[in-house]
Amino acid sequence: MTDLAGDMRFLQAAALLPHRLRKPLERLGEEDQHRAEEIRLRCGRPASLVFPEGERPFPGGGDLVTAGDLSLVLEIATQASAHTALSQVKNGFFTVRDGHRIGICGSAVVKNGGIYNLRQISSLAIRIAREAIGAAAPVADKLLEHGRLRSTLILSPPGWGKTTLLRDLIRMISDGDGMSPMRVGVADERGELAAVWEGKPQLNVGALTDVMDGCPKAAGLLMLLRGMNPQVLCADEITAPEDAAALEMAANCGVVLLATAHAEGKEDLYSRPLYRRLLEGNTFQRLVSIERTPTGRAFRVEKLGEKAC
């Protein structure tokens, strides 16, 4: 689905750049603005853009990125509070206004065995925040059984749209778009679902959604379960045993679950003990597989133990 605000989102992200780096992007066509996923800045190298098919230099090649350029991006993005952003480097990134996320690399300052700060910034990755309102419409009704939402695991290889699909499902459930509205709790460890900035989600996750931002998924899920009385709990990219244990606990409390996983398909899931336990324990009753087609993406919805639909 095309993001109708894609050009606006691109221009918001481009506005974080110094003028001399921003100017070449003004020559980028609207289609490429819609398709661009990241802006990459590496000290001593030409600036580049990341597209679904790969990375390529700015239009016209562009000048080499300097250390001063990287510092200026941080000043612009943080409204002259770069030291605040650098204090968040233990996460590897920070979120700025409008939901764009900036990954950061440099020389680490280590304290008590952990990364405390960064100096001599060497590269930045500006992840362009995008929404696709309506992306979940083709699958939402297939996740209902007798009008009741079923716990669902979304899977695909990296970069195929799991997070985008999950975010729009959260919005639909929270706002009652095509179903009865429900309270949704989101454990947003990496800030990719809601992109919270100064306490407010920058991406549309619905009116009845509560977000636990920036903490480990397992801890966030349990805090939401204990404190916010959610009807639905959501988390992106389940990868660790503690994440799975938190989901099992929530399922035993009668909460509907929505989550994603990196996998090629159902067989791939069952080959991994972490996911096999969740599936065989009936923690999830639906699987949504995202598949690439010659014309884009297709969704395959499967009831566990039954044929796909």
Image (tube, rainbow, N blue to C red):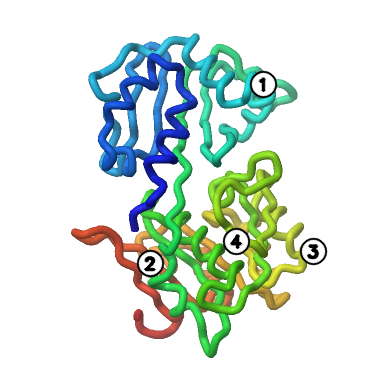
Position of residue 262 in the picture relative to residue 79 (left or right): left
In which quadrant will I find the N terminus?
bottom left
Mark 2 element type: strand
Numbered label attached to residue 70: none
Q: Amino acid at mark 2?
A: Ser
For mark 1, what is the residue?
A: 81
Mark 3 element type: helix
Distance from Cα at disc 2 to Cα at disc 3: 31 Å
Q: Residues within 10 Å of mark 4 (few under 14, many from 20)?
A: many
Distance from Cα at disc 1 to Cα at disc 3: 35 Å
In which quadrant will I find the C terminus?
bottom left
For mark 4, what is the residue?
A: 206
Front residue of 10/290: it is 10
Q: Are marks 3 and 4 in contact (CB under 8 Å)?
A: no
For mark 3, what is the residue?
A: 226
For mark 2, what is the residue?
A: 289
Q: Are marks 2 and 4 in contact (CB under 8 Å)?
A: no
